[in-house]
């Protein structure tokens, strides 16, 4: 990544980051140089996009083919009543522009499909998957691995959520390959087994918790601060206000 200097306005805007020894001026420059793709500007993507923009991620890509509806507004906080009917990419881009004019937004009003991937994925340094279907989650994981791009993957249910960070193209501290998405979830559940939120509902603030955690993990990966959730799945139960973490490893391949 090419590291550009911070302007006086940026130094003031990000002062609270720069004061942190783990971030500092160099970390903020890394954020400015970063190019992050967010799949989905919905329940998880909305808070993630806002915090990435507020943090000063220099270029944010948004891929989503949906439009804003009234039922989205209970959880998709980047949109508002005035953007109902608009493309979510357009609504999110305008919200980010109001929040931080230093951030460049690239919008793709289409589905995350192989045709799109082949043309655009190589331009990004990190992917956040906020999609709501298994086909996209597995596709994002496969593409990120093949492209050697870190992936932050998250999901929510009615009152629970989870997230992890995937870097299967690297080794851990002991020299073992980091796990893949399929080491955690070997295959998607049968179609219809897991109902969507339109059928069962979802607590709006839950998506804010998990989406914000996804943004935090992305910022850690970019700046090198802390220990990202590589090989660990963080689970959140909103009803009991409980967090749990499980570790998972690369599965051995036979045959």
Image (cartoon, rainbow, N blue to C red):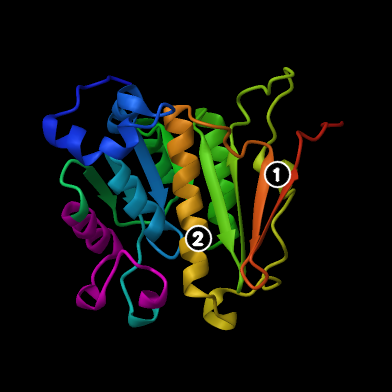
The residues colored magenta run 72-98
Residue 191 rendering spot, x and y as whole percentages: 67, 68
Circle 2: is it few (<14), some (14-19), or many (20+) Cα within 10 Å?
some
- Between 199 and 76, the residue placed more toward the observer is 76
Q: Quadrant of the N terminus?
A: top left
Is residue 131 among what the camera can see?
A: no
Q: Residue at x 44, y 65 (%)?
A: 43
Left or right, residue 227 beside residue 35: right
In the image, is residue 244 above or below residue 121? below
Q: Secondary structure at mark 1?
A: helix
Q: Tell whether label 2 touches label 1 (CB within 8 Å).
A: no
Identify the mark nearer the N-term, 1 or 2: 1
Q: How many marks?
A: 2
Any magenta on residue 240? no
Q: Which residue is disc 2 drawn over?
A: 209
Q: Residue at x 21, y 41 (%)?
A: 13
* Structural distance between the alpha carbons of marks 1 and 2: 25 Å
The extreme left residue here reads: 8
Residue 30 rendering spot, x and y as whole percentages: 34, 27
Circle 1: is it few (<14), some (14-19), or many (20+) Cα within 10 Å?
some
Q: Quadrant of the C terminus?
A: top right
Residue 182 circle label: 1
Q: Residue at x 26, y 36 (%)?
A: 15
């Amino acid at each position: 990544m090419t590291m550009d200097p911070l302007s006086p306005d940026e130094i003031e805007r990000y002062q609270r980051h720069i004061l942190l020894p783990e971030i500092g001026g160099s970390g903020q420059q890394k954020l400015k140089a970063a190019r992050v793709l967010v799949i989905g500007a919905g329940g998880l993507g909305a808070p993630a996009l806002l915090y990435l923009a507020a943090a000063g991620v220099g270029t944010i890509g948004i891929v989503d083919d949906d439009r804003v509806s009234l039922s989205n507004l209970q959880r998709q906080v980047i949109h508002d009543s005035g953007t109902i009917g608009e493309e979510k990419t357009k609504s999110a881009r305008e919200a980010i522009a109001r929040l931080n004019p230093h951030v460049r937004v690239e919008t793709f009003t289409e589905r995350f499909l192989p045709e799109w991937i082949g043309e655009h994925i190589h331009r990004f340094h990190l992917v956040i998957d906020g999609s709501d279907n298994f086909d996209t989650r597995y596709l994002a994981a496969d593409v990120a691995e093949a492209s050697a791009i870190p992936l932050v993957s998250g999901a929510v249910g009615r009152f629970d959520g989870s997230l992890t960070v995937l870097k299967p193209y690297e080794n851990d501290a002991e020299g073992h390959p980091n796990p893949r998405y399929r080491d955690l979830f070997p295959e998607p559940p049968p179609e219809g087994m897991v109902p969507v939120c339109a059928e069962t509902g979802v607590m709006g603030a839950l998506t804010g918790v998990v989406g914000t955690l996804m943004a935090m993990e992305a910022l850690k990966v970019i700046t090198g601060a802390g220990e990202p959730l590589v090989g660990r799945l963080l689970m959140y139960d909103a009803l009991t206000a409980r967090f749990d973490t499980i570790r998972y490893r690369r599965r051995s391949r036979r045959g």
